[in-house]
Amino acid sequence: MPKKITRNLLPGKLAGLAIMGAMAVPAAVLADGAPLQLPQSVSSDQKTKSLKVELEVKSEAYTLSGPSPTPNDSTKSNPVVKARGIKLTGSQPKASQANGLLVGPTLRIRPGDKFDAKLINSLSYSESEGDGSHSMTNPHGFDVINLHTHGLHVSPNSPSDNVLLSIYPQGTPDYVLQDCGNESGQANCVTGQYRYSYNIPSNHPSGTYWYHAHKHGAVSMHLADGFAGALIIEDPKHGLESLPAVQKAQEQILMLQEAQYNGDHKGDSTDPYQITCMSVYFNNTGCAFGGPNLPTPKVTNNAISVNGQFQPSISMRTNEAQLWRVINGTIGNVVPMCLLPLNGTTAPSPTSYVLATDGVPLQRPTASTTDLPVIMGLTPAATPINGDDVLNNELLFLAAGQRLDMMVQAPSKAGTYGLYDSAVAGTGLPIRQLCQASAYANATPILTVSVTDSASDIAYNTAIPTQAELNKLNAPKTITVEQSPQLPTQGLVYGFTTNTYANKDGGASVVNGRVFNPLRSQRDLVLNQVDKWAVQSAADTHMFHIHINSFQLVSRGQLDYPFPVWRDTLLVNCAGVAEKNGGCSFPGGLTGTNPSGNYGEVVQFVQQPLDYTGSLVEHCHNVSHEDNGMMELVEILPPIQGKKGKSGNPHKVHSH
């Protein structure tokens, strides 16, 4: 007989939160979505332990299937958008069939693999797209590209994850390349194409990562263009893929994106919508690039698509458990990952068991052998008072750049459910209304989930892995209190200026009062040395992201996380007064006893740079802030000869 599996919740308060979500008043669904299509996919060859791909970026028309979020007399559904999309034009091994979606192909590699990617720039040089401009705060360079493997622990140096590299179109004038060389070094300024090569560590955690362009000044534009795709590390020996329940489950890839187009067009093949500087940045002066100020579009899209589709639907059978890999590839949205009942559904919402955060297994050290993984609550803690509340919001609010690997299990009764953005009609909801179905009565869901009774004998997965199984998977070694400095050794505050550094932009987005400077390091870290970071917002909501090395969360405000949670991207909440007065782009709940205070909460985490030295960046992953200067050049230095940092331990992971 199989072992009895107990459905214990940890943290305990999440159980109550999930029940509250199930009891919410059902919302209305505006349209029944077509089935979710998955991106084209290619996996590494396990005989050669390698994957070779050729990726091309070209400006073309794409059809975004589903109801148009900007309907007009010409286009009610399936709008056509011209975008700088990324396509797979060759691979070894062969890929699955291309499907024309405005999303990059899913790339699947394993620990120990070599991954080679030839990135081809087939765009045209254009002064009106800012391709000849250089600025730390102004949008520019929309036809200049590169590639970032978000979350991967690989070398930050060429030909690997070097985001200081710029790939210009063929025909770019020499003086532009010379200016680029003066700013970033001549080796970082190429034309036409570039061959990236990555060596994936043999002990790399398995989970969901992603790739996207990272040309400073154009990141928002390229994400709006759909230049992004899933990058999945699969490990059938010591990773999620070794778990029987995961092996049997149907997989869903959900790439959440914003095709932020100018809707002042027909939106059909004769007059497609355009993704422009003004539709993405709304900067009348900065988008002019020396010409007259540009008009603001009358209509722009900010609806979230999934895999290049509007309002798609996922089908499930009663009690079925699916593997969902969710990536927030939006420009700066925070998406509450609650599934709300629709159309009079009375059955409880599907249950989401969290397997990994930002590609690292969520390992709860005190779990018994029969505990299931942590269940995501369905409503936020508006004013967290303990570590359970902090963890609940950490898992529920998926910030831009973050990922979740989840087992989503349908209820035992049929029903329809919706996933929604944190804003309705362009206005952000107060935190107490997030995940309350009544607040979305007139809103359009990002996607729907249709649960039906099984009417056939075809078997499907209902199993969930245990927490004990998750705890055996490869993951970074926990950084102990003894290894960590008692007080922060790295401090960071995100904020804004009034005209300083960026007069024509109305101000800059800054880190510790300064904008990005590629000419010299703005922050030095030491290989193998443990640092305690303290990150805070002076105004608005931000998403801290640092390349190459993940970090271990310690506390948020005055509250400690109940156990180690690993991230590479982190939601940083607003200052209390700004939140109270509606000055936040996302109404994240503050922690501690005084949430209406005048300062943003401090989030603390520990990090130990491992294996690689070189230059990388940290920045806000609300990438409109990054394009406006909110980024730092970070240098990982070799250990000082004869001295040790707080921890000189080599890189270790669980090994089984």
Image (cartoon, rainbow, N blue to C red):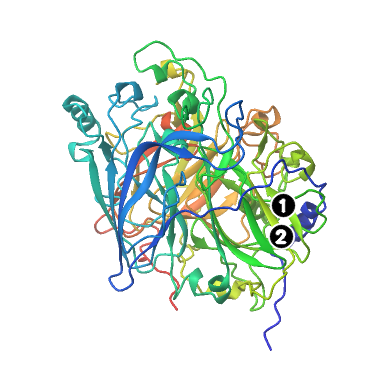
Please give the name of the residue rendered at 37% of the width and 32% of the height, measured from the top-left corner.
516
Which disc, if any, is residue 204?
none
Q: Quadrant of the C terminus?
A: bottom left
The picture places residue 329, in percent across and down from the top left corner, at 50, 44
**Disc 2 to disc 1: CB gap under 8 Å:** yes
Instruction: Report whether 146 appears left or right of 588.
Output: left
Q: Is residue 505 visible?
A: yes
Coordinates of residue 296 in the picture (x, y in percent): 51, 17
Image spot of residue 640 (x, y percent) = 27, 54
Q: Examine the rendered structure and indicate whether residue 26 appears above or below residue 323.
A: above
Nearer-the-camera pick, 488 or 168: 168
Q: Amino acid at mark 1?
A: Tyr
State how far apart marks 2 and 1 are (Cα): 8 Å
| Residue linked to disc 2 | 451
**Residue 133 sits above or below residue 549 on the image:** above
Between 178 and 345, the one lying in front of the other is: 345
Which quadrant of the structure image shows residue 96? bottom left
Residue lying at the far bottom in this picture: please name it: 1
Q: Secondary structure at mark 1?
A: strand
Q: Which residue is mark 1?
A: 417
Judge by depth and name the residue closer to the eye, 56 or 278: 56
User: Element under label 2?
Assistant: strand
First in sequence: mark 2 vs mark 1: 1
Task: Look at the picture and state if 581 lies above or below 154.
Answer: above
